[in-house]
Structures are given as structure tokens and as C-alpha cells.
Image: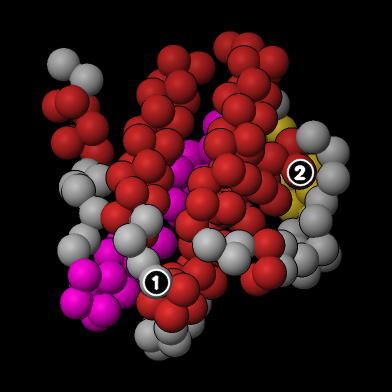
Amino acid sequence: MNIQDLRTLLDYHYWARDRMLKALDPLTPEQFTKELGSSFTSIQDTLGHVYSAEWAWHQRWTGTSPTAQLPRETFPDVATVRRLWQKTEADVRGFLESLGEAGIERTFDYKTLAGDPGSSVFWHMLQHVVNHGSYHRGQITTMLRQLGLPAPESTDLIRFYRTRK
């Protein structure tokens, strides 16, 4: 793994995020918060979880280990999530660039939300952020289908690569 590979993964991650958010724009407040029985009960909670996890990883990289995910009230609607995430995207991209090629091998010590100690190589954590987002985008797609709404445009990695040709 090198820094260009990580840039590409982030490009994919935020491209897929934007496709997902576009599909969520038409939701009514009732649809956004409706309990649908997934691992996080609603689209609001699932979206909040994905964002909170990315935010928490960035906090760990900059020396603070959060003790809880951000509260549900942080995510009242899709527009708010989009604004928050765009700032975090800039922070994550900036942090990657500040590390440079050699820095992506750096090991970070942190605490999990439960307070347990952790230690991971940066590029492993960044890959995790992207993979975690993919997993939960799939859940959100299922929730949209449960509501009888269209799924996002394809967020498959190969589709992303094809769009970059």
C-alpha cells in the first residue's frame, strides 16, 4: 500500500458516499427516522454511525480517543450529515497528506469507544474506514428498498474505476 493507493481509496469512499447521500435526499423526516430493524434501527442511525466512526478514527489519529459515538441529535437530516462529512473529508484528506508516504506506516495508539487500548498501522485503519462505509452503505440500500424507494446509483468499486477512465 502506498499513499496514492490510499488517495484512490478515499476518492472511492467519498464518491460512493455522495451517491448514497443523493439517494437519501428525497427522504421525508418520517422515512429518515423510521425503525426498520437493521443493526442500527433507522437510516438516520446507520448514517450517523458511519459518519461517527469515521470522525472517531480521525480524532484518534490527531490524539483524542472519543468515549462515545456522536449523539443521534447530531444528525437531524441528510443535509446536516452532508455538511459535517464534507468537513471531515477535508480533515481526513489533509491528515493523509500531512503524513506523507513514510507516515502511512506509522502505528497509532488509541482507545476504543469502550476504553480498551488499541494500536494499529495508519493505512490499515484507513482501509477499515473505507470498508466499514461500504458495509453500511449496503445496509442503507436495503433500508431504502424496504421503504419502497430507489437504491443509490451503483457504488461498486469497479464502477468507480470505470468512471475514472
Residue interval drawn in magenta: 122-149
Q: Is residue 120 magenta?
A: no
- The three-letter amino acid code for the residue at tag 1 is Thr
Residue in the picture at 71% in, 33% down: 107
Q: Secondary structure at mark 2?
A: helix
**Nearer-the-camera pick, 8 or 86:** 86
Viewer can see residue 7 = yes
Residue 89 percent location from the top left of the image = 57, 34
Q: Which residue is mark 1?
A: 28
Quarter of image, res 162: top left
The residue at the point 40 percent across, 39 percent down is 13
- Spot occupied by residue 146 in the image (x, y as percentages of width and height): 24, 80
Number of marks: 2
- Whether 70 is drawn above or below 58: the answer is below
Which residue is denoted by mark 2 in the rendering?
60
First-in-chain label (1 vs 2): 1
Q: Nearer the viewer, residue 131 or 86?
A: 86
Percent position of residue 111, x then y: 80, 55
Give the quarter of the figure containing the N terminus. top left
